Image: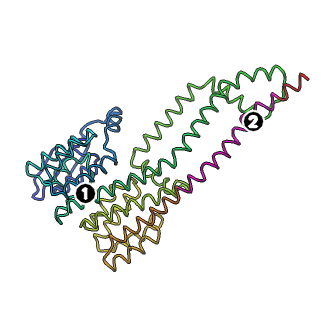
C-alpha cells in the first residue's frame, strides 16, 4: 500500500514523498530507519474490498517463505553469489508476488544496494523481522546461517498455525452442517406437519410448539433475518478492524477459557522463537523486542512488547520489565530470563521457553482434539434427539387418536 509522508532530516530539511509498505507501522519503521523524523503519514489511496480480496489470493504464504529461505541457504552454502542465487530462485518460485519481489531485489542489489536495503524496499512482502535478521547477518557475515534460521522460523510458524486450524476445523464443519440441517427442518418440514397436528387437535409438547413457532417465524421473515444477520456481521467485522476493536478481540482471545488455553502458549512460543532468532543473529535486545512486537499478530502483546522495549532502553532488565505483566507473561518466563541475563545466554533461554510452551501448545491441541469428538457426539446426539422427539412424540399421539 502507498503512504504519503512529510518528514524532516537530522539537518532540519523538509522532505515530502510517497512510500510503499504493507502497513502504516512498516512505513513508519522504514522512514525512521532512514533517519527521518515523521511529521505526517497517511494512506495515499483507498483500499477497496476487491483489492483486499485480490491481495488475499495473491499473498505470499509461510510455505513460500520456507521454500525460499531454505533454498537460499543451500545456494549460499554452495558459495553461489547472492545475485545469481536470487535469479535462480526467481525462476523456481511459483508464487507470482514473491517472484516479482525477488527479481526487484536482485536488480536493486546489482545497482549497488545491500541485500537488507533491497528487501526493505519490498516491505509489502518481506517483514521487518526478515529484513532485520538479514541486516544483522550482513554485519556478522553469516547470511547463509540467517537464511537457515528464517526457514526454521517459518516452518515452525506453519506447523503451529496448521495444528491450531486442524483442531478447530472439525467442530466448525460439524456444527455448521447441523445448524444448516436444523434450519431446513424447522423452516421447510415442520411447517408442513403443523397443520396436521392442529386439525387433529393433538396436544403438542412445549419444545414442539417452540420449533413450529420458530419455523413459521423464519419462513415469514427469513429475508429480514438474513439482512439483519449480515448487517450485524458487517458491523462486528468493521469494529474489529478499528484499533479499539482489534484490542478488544485480541484481549478476548487471551481471556476466554478454551481459546485462551491455545492462544497464550501460541503467543509465548511465537515471541520466544522470534526473539531467540534475532538475538542469535546479533540484533540488540531493545530492537529485538520492537521487531517482535510487529510479528506477534496481537494488539495487546504488541503494545506490551513496545513498553518492555522502552523499559529496556531506559536501563531496566528484561526479566524485571516483563514481570510487570504477569497476566500475559507467566512468572516462569521472567524467572528463566533472569537466569539467562546472569549467564549471558538470553537467546538460549528464549529457545527453551519456546520449546516449553510449544510442547504445552501441542498437548493442549491434542487434548482438545481428543475431547472434542466425544463431547460433540453427546451434544449433537441430545440436540438431534430433541429435534426428532419433538416430531415423533406428537406423531405417536396422533396415531393413538385413530386407534
Badge 2 element: helix
Residue drawn at x 67%, y 45% as measured from the top left: 379
Q: As rendered, which of 365 and 148 lies closer to the eye? A: 148
The image quarter in which residue 356 lies: bottom left
Is 267 placed left or right of 200 in the picture? left
Above or below 181: residue 358: below
Determine the residue located farthest toward the left in the rendered image: 111
Is 191 placed left or right of 320 in the picture? right
Report the coloring of the rendering.
Answer: rainbow
Where residue 312 sits: x, y (%)? 31, 70
Categorize mark 2 by other alpha carbons within 10 Å: few (<14), some (14-19), many (20+). some
Badge 1 element: helix
In this picture, which residue range is highlighted in magenta?
366-395
Categorize mark 1 by other alpha carbons within 10 Å: few (<14), some (14-19), many (20+). many
Above or below 373: residue 228: above
Tags 1 and 2 touching, CB below 8 Å:
no
Magenta span includes 369: yes
Amino acid at each position: 500500500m502507498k503512504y504519503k509522508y512529510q518528514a524532516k532530516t537530522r539537518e532540519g530539511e523538509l522532505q515530502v514523498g510517497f512510500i510503499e509498505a504493507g502497513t502504516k507501522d512498516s512505513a513508519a519503521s522504514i522512514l525512521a530507519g532512514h533517519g527521518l523524523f515523521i511529521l505526517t503519514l497517511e494512506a495515499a489511496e483507498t483500499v477497496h474490498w476487491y483489492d483486499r480480496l485480490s491481495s488475499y489470493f495473491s499473498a505470499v504464504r509461510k510455505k513460500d517463505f520456507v521454500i525460499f529461505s531454505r533454498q537460499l541457504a543451500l545456494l549460499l552454502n554452495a558459495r553461489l553469489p547472492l545475485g545469481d542465487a536470487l535469479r535462480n530462485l526467481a525462476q523456481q518460485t511459483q508464487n507470482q508476488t514473491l517472484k516479482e519481489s525477488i527479481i526487484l531485489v536482485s536488480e536493486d542489489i546489482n545497482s549497488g544496494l545491500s541485500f537488507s536495503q533491497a528487501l526493505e524496499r519490498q516491505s509489502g512482502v518481506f517483514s521487518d523481522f526478515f529484513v532485520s535478521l538479514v541486516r544483522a547477518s550482513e554485519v556478522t557475515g553469516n547470511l547463509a546461517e540467517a537464511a537457515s534460521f528464517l526457514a526454521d522460523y517459518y516452518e515452525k510458524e506453519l506447523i503451529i498455525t496448521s495444528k491450531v486450524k486442524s483442531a478447530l476445523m472439525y467442530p466448525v464443519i460439524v456444527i455448521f452442517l447441523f445448524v444448516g440441517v436444523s434450519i431446513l427442518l424447522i423452516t421447510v418440514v415442520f411447517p408442513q406437519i403443523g397443520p396436521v397436528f392442529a386439525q387433529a387437535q393433538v396436544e403438542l409438547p412445549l419444545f414442539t410448539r417452540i420449533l413450529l413457532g420458530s419455523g413459521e417465524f423464519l419462513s415469514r421473515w427469513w429475508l429480514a433475518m438474513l439482512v439483519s444477520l449480515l448487517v450485524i456481521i458487517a458491523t462486528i467485522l468493521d469494529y474489529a478492524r478499528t484499533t479499539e476493536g482489534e484490542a478488544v478481540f485480541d484481549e478476548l482471545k487471551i481471556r476466554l477459557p478454551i481459546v485462551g488455553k491455545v492462544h497464550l502458549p501460541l503467543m509465548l512460543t511465537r515471541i520466544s522463537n522470534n526473539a531467540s532468532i534475532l538475538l542469535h543473529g546479533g540484533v540488540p535486545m531493545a530492537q529485538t523486542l520492537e521487531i517482535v512486537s510487529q510479528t506477534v499478530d496481537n494488539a495487546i502483546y504488541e503494545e506490551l512488547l513496545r513498553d518492555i522495549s522502552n523499559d529496556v532502553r531506559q536501563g531496566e532488565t528484561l526479566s524485571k520489565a516483563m514481570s510487570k505483566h504477569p497476566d500475559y507473561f507467566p512468572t516462569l518466563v521472567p524467572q528463566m530470563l533472569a537466569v539467562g541475563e546472569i549467564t549471558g545466554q538470553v537467546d538460549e533461554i528464549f529457545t527453551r521457553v519456546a520449546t516449553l510452551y510449544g510442547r504445552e501448545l501441542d498437548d493442549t491441541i491434542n487434548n482438545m482434539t481428543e475431547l472434542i469428538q466425544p463431547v460433540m457426539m453427546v451434544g449433537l446426539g441430545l440436540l438431534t434427539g430433541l429435534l426428532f422427539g419433538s416430531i415423533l412424540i406428537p406423531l405417536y399421539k396422533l396415531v393413538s387418536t385413530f386407534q
